[in-house]
Amino acid sequence: MNERSGERRNEAGNLSEGAGLDPELRERLGRSLKELSDVKFALDEASIVAATDRKGVIQYVNDKFCEISGYTREELLGQDHRIVNSGYHGKAFMRELWRTIASGRVWRGEIRNRAKDGRAYWVDTTIVPFVDGEGIPYQYLAIRHEVTRLKETEAQLQAMMAQLMQVQEEERRRISRDLHDGIGQSLFSLKIAIDRLLADGGHEHLRGLGSEVSRLMADVRGLAWELRPSVLDDLGVVPALRTYIEHYERHYGIRVRFDCDVRRRPDLLAETTLYRVVQEALTNVGKYAGVAEATVRVRDLGACIEAVVEDQGAGFRREEAGRGVGLFSMEERARAVSGELAVRSEPGRGTTVTLKVPVGERREGATGTDRAL
């Protein structure tokens, strides 16, 4: 048995020696204290543990907390968790955390902290409030597990996914340009030659050939547009969406109310994300909603641009719909630009897709509410 195990046994044995206690009661008390000591030992061995008072002042930390943070126990006790705050999480995140635990509810989530040497680390965190007889928290116990490698792997995968989507967009742009400038121009030249032959009294069957070439040119233009509209690169996301909606209304027969107050152009990746998510959401409306009308709203909210696609159609249950390719694509595009995607739907009451894309986003520094566990 190691030294710490011996300490646990001695502590439990000493605490159970109560003069004047009934032997059976003393034995039961000893067993209970031994079980509690074992639980504490197991928790300390497996997890990063800290306890604070109701104001967030640290009252207890275990060895693993000291090890991962780089601070000694003496440096941590009496402080609050701003000592390891990385400044990564915004004020809204911290307010929600404190609102949850102050109401006596358990909070679970992932937090990025900063060690004494400046190293950032991630911890999967559960904060349990201890409440008094009136339900008011008097102490908080935070149990954590380090997930830094997992978060780094996730970040690498997201970066790879963003790079892949960017490569796809570049390839779409190249093929679209080739179709428009190469094949399209060749077909246009052929059409002019056919028209000239017809004007010079050429055979009547050339007239039918000219019509076929015209239809082929229209198909090529449509294919180039589907791959990547040149107006998106040349003029920006708002004109691109207006043009797309015109094509969409003709194709699906669904009227789209487009409301937009954006007057600036975000970066190309943000514009592409906004365009593709709206495109995918409207395509789903056309295929599944069974409506005659939909709404697209694009708003400039200062720190971000918000796009909302809404219909009052068939709707669906998220848990039954799973994660199709379309939804996966929208979520990955949003993640690639640090955006937020929310899909709200209910059978018979329609679907709302909301995308928020940050523009010139700045991280907020540590504040008084950032003392969180």
Image (spheres, rainbow, N blue to C red):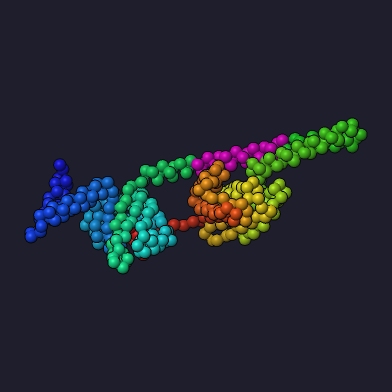
Image point 59% across, 59% down: which residue? 299
Per the rendered image, the range of residues in magenta is 161-183
Q: Is residue 284 above or below residue 310?
A: above
The N terminus, quarter of image: top left
Q: Nearer the viewer, residue 272 or 28?
A: 28
Residue projecting furthest to the bottom:
134
Residue 63 left/right relative to 95: left
Image point 46% across, 41% down: which residue? 157
Residue projecting furthest to the left:
19
Residue 226 left/right relative to 28: right
Residue 10 image offset from top left, x and y in percent: 12, 50
Image point 36% across, 50% down: which residue? 124
Q: Is residue 309 visible?
A: no
Residue 196 image offset from top left, x and y in percent: 86, 36
Identify the image quadrant of residue 59.
bottom left
Q: Nearer the viewer, residue 77 or 100?
A: 100
Residue 346 left/right relative to 20: right
Q: Nearer the viewer, residue 356 or 20?
A: 20
Residue 261 image offset from top left, x and y in percent: 62, 61
Image point 54% across, 61% down: which residue? 302
Q: Nearer the viewer, residue 187 or 93?
A: 93
The C terminus, quarter of image: bottom left
Q: Is residue 61 visible?
A: yes
Residue 90 image offset from top left, x and y in percent: 42, 59
